[in-house]
Image (cartoon, rainbow, N blue to C red):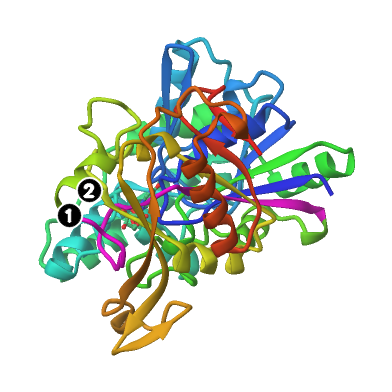
Amino acid sequence: MTATILVGAQWGDEGKGRVADWLAAQSNVVARFAGGDNAGHTVYVGTKVYKLHLIPSGILHEQVVCVLGNGMVINPVNLVREIDELEAAGVSVTPDRLVISTRAHVITPAHIALDKASEKARGEGAIGTTLRGIGPAYLDKTGRQGIRMGQMRDVEAFADALYDGMRRANESLVHQGMEAVDAQTGTEAYLDAALRLQPYLRDTSVYLNEQLRGGATVLCEGAQGTMLDVDHGDYPYVTSSSPTSGGALMGLGFGPREVSRVVGVAKCFSTRVGSGPMPTELSGEPARRLRGTGENFWDEFGTTTGRPRRCGWFDAVQVRYAAQVNGFTEMVLTKLDILSGFDELNIAVAYELDGEQLNAAPDTLSSLERVTPVYQTMKGWTEDVSGARRWDDLPAEAQAYISRLGVLVGVPVSTVSVGPEREQLVFI
Ligand code: IMP
């Protein structure tokens, strides 16, 4: 049992990148299992900032082999760009360091056009997607008409498949009253990308099972978060994949007996980008304080889209639900440092709906949109905690806050991050 699954416990952007970076240091293989370049991990190493969308941050550790699993949808042109940028920064991304599933699906320019058209057609009810073509690519996958990365091995057949996909998308776009995509647009870049990526393609399920049998330590790096899961999240305000622990097995192709640890990452408060319910959302000054100004890369602005994130108090009802869906064995809480200076901190411990107190979220969107949080208020602290490295370094109020979150969620908190740098972690 040598696999660890790392997943977001909220709406994505929990700071998984930095946790993955820390866990990758103890791993041989780091594998992504769902989503595509809708994700964005920011990793800070010394003075360098890396923004990764497709390649796991494990690539920054020399001993690690990274895997893009079958559950992913991949924009090959953007992947090649990411490889080139990493190589230019001195990080080796050769086929012995990056392995791409032949079963992962390809995002085409048609998918991106369809994503935009679908968001436009929804008007006020738009999901607020990242417009990276994620939903339409998964729609083609489950509709059994997608293009798999393995098809790149035969570039001519791949070109035909791309052309067919564009033609189908154009029919749909025109039907929706939108402009058709030029079927030649970007095709050349896709064919170049196919040639570049051929040496990286493999049956990654076979590869991972071999590695696990040989005793390798595998980190399954989730993108997005539990509340964006297509089954378990706030449907329809979700992404089109399963970023939860069950999705890791499906998206990588090995069995549950291999998994020893499921690490849930949550911020010490809540953030969300895109539309959908967020019971503890704040406005005004407290939200601005949690969000930051956007001057620092760790401020609450999307890595992929640059959108300001919605900010709110920690929602223990929601994270408790995530713990249940994923089976967390431990929690990592991030960004404790941002809470310094608040006189008081609120934690949602229950919801109220039509005068009734609920200890779990209702399972219909229309009810969830009407709940109001029941808060427990805790005393804040003024001390800067960014230099803390041990539990005893934290002010008593911060200790009480963290302990309370662990009790409310029902999962032990193993680690707290107090800043963006690698060493800014408090192990409990
Ligand atoms: P899509 O994944 O681009 O289709 O977007 C669907 C929803 O998931 C939108 O609300 C996005 O803002 C959200 N989303 C997708 N990827 C991420 C992520 O990496 N972090 C946070 N939110 C995300």
Other residues around mark 2 within 10 Å, as few (<14) / some (14–19) / many (≥20): some
Residue 8 falls left or right of residue 199: left
Magenta span of residues: 258-283
The front one of 73 and 38 is 38
Residue 344, image x and y in percent?
A: 32, 50
- Whether residue 332 is visible to the viewer of this picture, yes or no, is yes
Residue position for label 1: 283
* Amino acid at the residue labelled 2: Ala
Residue ID at (42%, 50%): 12
Does residue 114 appear to the left or right of 264 in the view shown? left
On screen, residue 351 above or below 219: below
Q: Which kind of residue does numbered mark 1 sit on?
A: Ser
Q: Are marks 1 and 2 in contact (CB under 8 Å)?
A: yes
**Can residue 55 be spotted in the picture?**
no
Residue occupied by mark 2? 287
Q: Is residue 308 magenta?
A: no
The image position of residue 237, as x and y in percent, is: 32, 67
Element at label 1? loop
